[in-house]
Image (spheres, grey):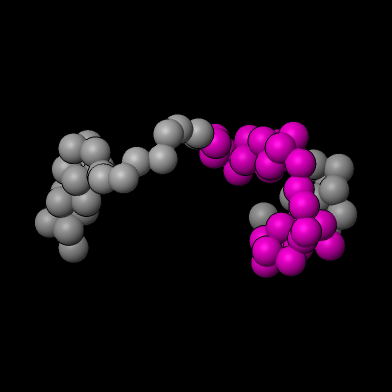
Amino acid sequence: MTQDELGRILGMSRATISGIETGNINEIGIRKIIALLAVLGLELFVGQKQRYPTLQQLRRENHEKKQR
């Protein structure tokens, strides 16, 4: 999907999509982020910052290393 196509779907300019992609946009609202993620089939998860990885994260990393 091109930036232009994504912008049309979201009602944003191609320049805005480009700025988001490159990190050159100063601020982006949460509604835009959620809309962008929805179109891309992603979701935003917010949780407490963890000092150490969870057991699930360690297992996933171990599994991914074994598959390489």
Image side of residue 35 versus residue 67, left or right: right
Task: Look at the picture and state if 50 lies above or below 22.
Answer: above
Task: Give the total of numbered labels.
Answer: 0
Q: Is residue 30 above or below residue 4?
A: above
Q: Nearer the viewer, residue 54 or 4?
A: 54
Q: Is residue 17 left or right of residue 52?
A: right
Q: Is residue 25 magenta?
A: yes
Residue at image position (71%, 37%) is 30
Q: Does the rendering let one see residue 53?
A: yes
User: Where residue 24 sits in the image (x, y, percent)?
Assistant: 74, 66
Residue at 62%, 40% in the rendered image:
37
Q: Position of residue 67 (x, y in %)?
A: 16, 56
Instruction: Please name the predominant secondary structure of the magenta segment in the image.
Output: helix
Image: 52 above or below 31: below
- Quarter of the image with the C terminus in it: bottom left
Classify 25 as above or below 5: below
Residue occupying the far left of the picture: 66
Which is more toward the observer, 22 or 11?
A: 22
Quarter of the image where the N terminus is located: bottom right
Q: Quadrant of residue 4?
A: bottom right
Magenta run includes residue 20: yes
Q: Is residue 3 visible?
A: no
Q: Which residue is drawn at the image coordinates 76% and 41% (left, top)?
A: 29
Magenta residues (range): 15-44
Apparent side of residue 46 relative to residue 23 in the rendered image (left or right): left
Q: Position of residue 31 (x, y in %)?
A: 74, 34
Which residue lies at the image location 78% right of the left edge and 59% below the top edge? 26
Q: Is residue 18 left or right of residue 54?
A: right
Image coordinates for residue 38, horizontal then vertical, percent: 63, 35
